[in-house]
Image (spheres, helix red, strand yellow):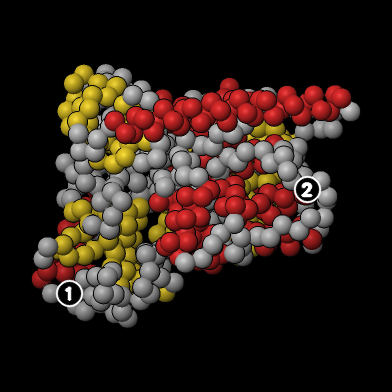
Amino acid sequence: MVKNIDEKSNAKAAVDKITGAKSNYQDDIKKEMDIIEKNKDYVVEIIDLNHEGQGVGHIGKLAVFVEGGVIGEKIEVKVIKIAKNYAVGKLQKIIRPSKSRVEPFCPNVRKCGGCSIQHIDYNSQLAYKTNLVKETLKRIGKIDESMVHDIIGMENPFNYRNKVQLPVGISNGKLEIGFYAKRSHDIVDNDECKIQDPVCDEIRIILRNFIAANRIDVYDETSHQGLIRHLMVRKGFRTGEVMVVIVINGKDLPAKRRLIDELVRQVPSIKSIMLNINTQKTNIILGNNNVKIYGEDTITDYIGDFKFYISPLSFFQVNSVQAEVLYNKVLEFSDLSGKETVFDLYCGTGTIALFLAKKALKVYGVEVVEDAVQDAWKNAEINSVKNTEFVLGDVEKMLPELYAQGVKADVIVVDPPRKGCETPLLDTIVDIHPNKVVYVSCNPATLARDLMYLEGKGYKTMEVQPVDMFPQTEHVETVVLLSQQRPDDKIEIDLDLDELDITSAESEATYEEIKSYILKKYGFKVSSLYIAQVKQKCGIIERINYNVSKKEDVGVPKCPKEKEDAIMETFKHFRMI
């Protein structure tokens, strides 16, 4: 009894020490904020880059994020925003440049929403991304950073994208076909994009001239009026075949024969021209209905030895060169002998599944996009792969159904969207208890969250391999191998008391501030429980709850969709995600 009291006292003293230190630090930050003035210039040393590729420095003890900053340089910044625990600065002048700084290749670098780290030399970009994966997995997932290999980069980090989607609109009376500006829907027009295939720029110019010559209305997202919404171009990296997709807010395109003739005349490699019908008032680019107006329904491309059919709605990695690197790494981590049953979750057009089928007994792919599943079956057929089966439906629903039918997997490959995996899906994976889980991720934060969850359920992170799928941007793809631990295996857990009560670097808002913001904006209240649930879903680490019930059958209410959406928007408002 005395021992338990002592342990509780020690734990309380440790927590008091942490919270006291945190309180003192926050007091210091508040004093710094009282001193710092908005629209005033300050000299800052850049010591790091954050997950958005922004330079990180300090004014006193207050962190300041600067677009265009590079590690190792001294710059002059104008403070344009002061938040709870950080400031945002605008680069005014480079006092001492970093050795890693290079001249940006795009004249619209300050406006366009892409290529955010093109001012950093490529080797330094690779080092940044390796470190980003290491630090994120360590901070959020408590994963040993020694598990992370150096990132695999490209020999030529330009003109690598095989797909482009360009909004079409009118700005100040001028027709614009380009990319969205940072944090807005203002279109930035540009005659050339160095990370796209050059054919995309040719087609953009042809469409611009066609719209002007034929006085075609273009879409206005505010009024939901106008016809042409987006231009999408896809190109087969190995085949050179080109697909042009015109997204319209209507049923047909006036003078389309003129456009077809001009496109085919100037770009002979075009094999398909499609109209995509999207009449919904939405930010989603593509509608579900495609109308072929020239050529074939699909184009083809190769990754490795496999040939793929690609339709307008198909998911296909935008970097074919690095996709082959990525898929071979998935195959390597799976370490198949020919006797295994494999699940490929979020399988898209079956690209990873076909690679796995080379060495597996059977591969089941699960995907929610119907066009992608149809393409997956076609891709298996044209490649004479007979040991694959593709299932249409939500992964979260279909995996438990497969398991209930007695279909079990020795290896599970999962390649989810940026939000990562839902907890019920991870629980089903654990119930199936495959020997290996290979996790492919485009978001280190949600990856770290899911790895921590799986490690708590008996899996161990063995290897982490970042792959640079998106040079010149802050994005990074990662492949992780997890292995099931045997009962006699030991898992060492290293808890750092200094981090027990500290959330991620972006988590500044308190629970009361979140509740107050939601009540004011949406007119309803949210509980701390609901906020905590959404934090967990977003990969924001929560403190240990010492007051949780010890009963096993306690019913925990789940956050309603309406309130979850409000909480997510509030996190974005406070820059927590």
Quadrant housing residue 406: bottom right
Q: Which residue is mark 2?
A: 549
Residue drawn at (51%, 31%), measured in percent from left and top? 23
The tag earlier along the polypeptide, 2 or 1, is: 1
Report the amino acid beneath label 2.
Answer: Ser
Report the amino acid beneath label 1.
Answer: Ile
- Residue 146 percent coordinates (x, y): 58, 22
| In front: label 2 or label 1 | 2
Looking at the image, is 216 positioned above or below residue 300? below
Whether residue 221 appears in this view of the structure is: yes
Residue drawn at (52%, 40%), measured in percent from left and top? 445
Helix, strand or loop for disc 1? loop
Spatial separation of the CA atoms under disc 2 and disc 1: 64 Å
Helix, strand or loop for disc 2? loop
Quadrant housing residue 455: top right
Give neighbour class at mark 1: few <14, some 14-19, many 20+ (Cα, 10 Å). Answer: some
- Residue 181 percent coordinates (x, y): 25, 51
Residue drawn at (16%, 69%), measured in percent from left and top? 211
Quadrant housing residue 102: top left
Residue drawn at (43%, 61%), measured in percent from left and top? 520
In depth, the one of 213 and 235 nearer the eye is: 213
Whether residue 309 appears in this view of the structure is: no
In depth, the one of 386 and 315 nearer the eye is: 315
- Residue 524 percent coordinates (x, y): 51, 65
Give neighbour class at mark 2: few <14, some 14-19, many 20+ (Cα, 10 Å). Answer: few
In depth, the one of 419 and 493 nearer the eye is: 493
Q: Which residue is mark 1?
A: 216
Q: Considering the image in quadrants, where does the N terminus appear? A: top right
